[in-house]
Amino acid sequence: QVQLVESGGGLVQLGGSLRLSCAASGRTFSDYAVAWFRQAPGKERECIAVMSRRRGVTRVADSVKGRFTISTDTAKNTMYLQKSNLAHEKTAIYYCAADRGIVRSSMFVWKNYDYWGQGTKVIVSS
């Protein structure tokens, strides 16, 4: 079992930066695939970034490439989503997710993850 707790959401201005954190307890991240998803009001949950050292994967969505970075700190058992230059982002709830048995080709689909954080809301203002 893995428990995930996100933090770092809030109000941010257009062009600003924000770092989201997702702390894990119960298990270590090292064998897990981890990911960030976001869901805007009335929209499908979309994959923003995935990472798995064991599977040799670190990727971000084309829509945020060059502006968002996913990383993990194994000593703190925490994953991060660094968001910069929030020029075109809309308000959304960001979720972190983890799964131990997921295969590489399934990492970008939210339904394939077993463990989820509670979500943290990011409000972009102009």
Image: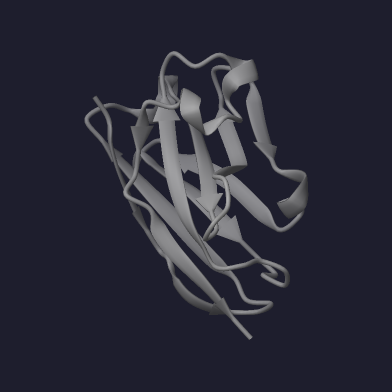
**Which residue occupies the extreme bottom position in the image?**
126
From this view, report whether residue 34 is shown above or below residue 64. Answer: above
Percent position (x, y) of residue 56? Answer: 64, 21
From this view, report whether residue 62 is shown above or below residue 59. Answer: below
Looking at the rendering, in which quadrant would you find the N terminus?
top left
Q: Which residue sits at x=41%, y=53%? A: 21
Please name the colour scheme applied to the rendered image. Answer: one colour
Q: Quadrant of residue 68?
A: bottom right
Q: Nearer the viewer, residue 66 or 106?
A: 106
Q: Which residue sits at x=48%, y=23%? A: 112
10 on left or right of 109 = left
Q: Which residue sits at x=54%, y=17%? A: 54
68 on left or right of 52 = right
24 on left or right of 97 = left
From this view, report whether residue 74 is shown above or below residue 20. Answer: above
Percent position (x, y) of residue 98? Answer: 42, 31
Q: Quadrant of residue 24?
A: top left
Percent position (x, y) of residue 96? Answer: 44, 43
Percent position (x, y) of residue 102? Answer: 49, 16
Q: Nearer the viewer, residue 79 or 118?
A: 118
Q: Which residue sits at x=58%, y=52%? A: 43
From this view, report whether residue 17 is shown above or below residue 81. Answer: below
Looking at the rendering, in which quadrant would you find the C terminus?
bottom right
Give the total of numbered labels: 0
